[in-house]
Image (cartoon, rainbow, N blue to C red):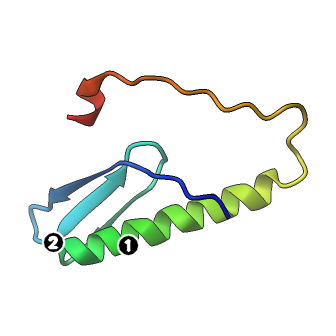
Amino acid sequence: MVTRRFTVVLEAAEEGGFVVKCLELPVATQGETREEALKNISEAIWGYLEVKAKLLHGKIRGERVEVVVEAPSALLA
């Protein structure tokens, strides 16, 4: 198992509760409380990655290389 960190944006929803979106993945969810929203996004990210891993299993050919890129700080503001 590999540990990865993801950046999420947590916003108060107009109708109450919170909406939370992952910046690196197409994953979003909500919760009645801040804690619930963060728990839900963690579960949603895990689920997304689990499905992605199953789809890619055995289909990736070639050399795996990790690339590190410095992102503009405006993306994290």
Work out whether 66 lies above or below 60: above
Label 2 secondary element: loop
Residue occupying image coordinates x 24% and y 25%: 74
Q: On the picture, is 22 further left or further right than 34?
A: right
Q: Are marks 2 and 1 in contact (CB under 8 Å)?
A: no
User: In the rendered image, which quarter is residue 34 located in?
Assistant: bottom left
Report which residue position mark 2 lands on. 17
Residue occupying image coordinates x 9% and y 61%: 14
Q: Which mark is residue 77?
A: none
Report which residue position mark 1 lands on. 40
Q: Nearer the viewer, mark 2 or mark 1?
A: 1
Q: Residues within 10 Å of mark 1 (few under 14, many from 20)?
A: some
Q: Residues within 10 Å of mark 2 (few under 14, many from 20)?
A: some
Q: Which amino acid type corresponds to the residue marked 1 in the rendered image?
A: Asn
Q: Which amino acid type corresponds to the residue marked 2 in the rendered image?
A: Gly
Q: On the picture, is 67 further left or further right than 71?
A: right
Quadrant in the picture for the C terminus: top left
Work out whether 67 lies above or below 46: above
Q: On the picture, is 64 further left or further right than 5?
A: right
How far apart, in angstroms, are the residues tagged by discs 2 and 1? 12 Å
Work out whether 10 lies above or below 40: above
User: In the rendered image, which quarter is residue 16 located in?
Assistant: bottom left
Q: Position of residue 53 (x, y in %)?
A: 73, 57
Q: Position of residue 31 (x, y in %)?
A: 26, 74
User: In the rendered image, which quarter is residue 50 located in?
Assistant: bottom right
Q: Position of residue 46 (x, y in %)?
A: 55, 66
Residue occupying image coordinates x 45% and y 55%: 27
Label 1 secondary element: helix
Q: Nearer the viewer, residue 3 or 14?
A: 3
Q: Earlier in the sequence, mark 2 or mark 1?
A: 2
Q: Position of residue 71 (x, y in %)?
A: 39, 24
Residue occupying image coordinates x 73% and y 31%: 65
